Amino acid sequence: HTLLRFLIRLQAMYHRVPFHNFYLAADTAHSMSLLVKALEGTDVLTPLDKLVLLTAAVLSFVGHPGLNNSRQYTVSSATAPPTAVCGVPLQLQLHHTALGMQLLANPNYGILQSLSKSDQRNAKRDICGCLLGTDMALHKEVVSHGRAALAS
């Protein structure tokens, strides 16, 4: 029941925008599930890794106002997250991550609560890394890091 409550609440947290909406999150989760399934039978992903990837996929765009980071800084809207704290621009990925962590911390929606405290901590850390890593400004760095990891 917790997973169903989580998904219903998560859907309500998505704005009705043309692209970065709950349908894109569901599509992203489905694509991630296909990638996870393709790695079935290998030692590449642990069960916790799979949970992290699928959870991050559905959280990827939560609260997205429909504008990209650069446009977000120049346009204000009623649904927009704060664009700066102490004059430092906030990326949308940080907003998605904060909303996702708040949802996961709520006992009514805490799909990670059945995990050990250590696994919960690791899962939350890795979900944060997945969400923050979707910032296209970091794309080249992330791809470079991934290539280096594959080469070693």
Image: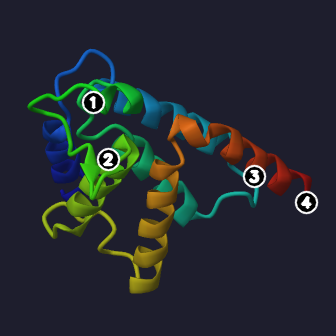
Alpha carbons under labels 3 and 2: distance apart: 23 Å
Q: Amino acid at mark 3?
A: His
Where disc 3 sits, the SS reads: helix
Q: Earlier in the sequence, mark 1 or mark 2?
A: 1
Q: Amino acid at mark 2?
A: His
Return the x and y of residue 15 as percentages of the image width and height: 17, 30
Could you classify mark 2 by the number of other residues whose Cα lies within 10 Å: few (under 14), some (14-19), or many (20 or more)? Answer: many
Q: Earlier in the sequence, mark 4 or mark 3?
A: 3
Return the x and y of residue 46 as percentages of the image width and height: 62, 64
Where disc 1 sits, the SS reads: helix
Q: Amino acid at mark 1?
A: Phe
Q: Amino acid at mark 4?
A: Ser
Asked if residue 45 lies left or right of residue 76, the reply is: right
Depth check, mark 1 against mark 2: the one in front is: 2
Q: Residue lying farthest bottom?
A: 117
Depth check, mark 3 against mark 1: the one in front is: 3
Q: Residue lying farthest left?
A: 78
Q: Quarter holding the C terminus? A: bottom right
Asked if residue 10 lies left or right of residue 116, the reply is: left
Where does label 1 land, which residue?
Answer: 22
Could you classify mark 1 by the number of other residues whose Cα lies within 10 Å: few (under 14), some (14-19), or many (20 or more)? Answer: many
Q: Which numbered marker is on residue 96?
A: 2
Answer yes or no: is residue 11 visible.
yes
Where disc 4 sits, the SS reads: loop
Q: Which numbered marker is on residue 145?
A: 3
Answer yes or no: is residue 39 visible.
no
Q: Which numbered marker is on residue 152?
A: 4
What residue lies at 41% left-to-right and 67% top-to-bottom?
A: 124
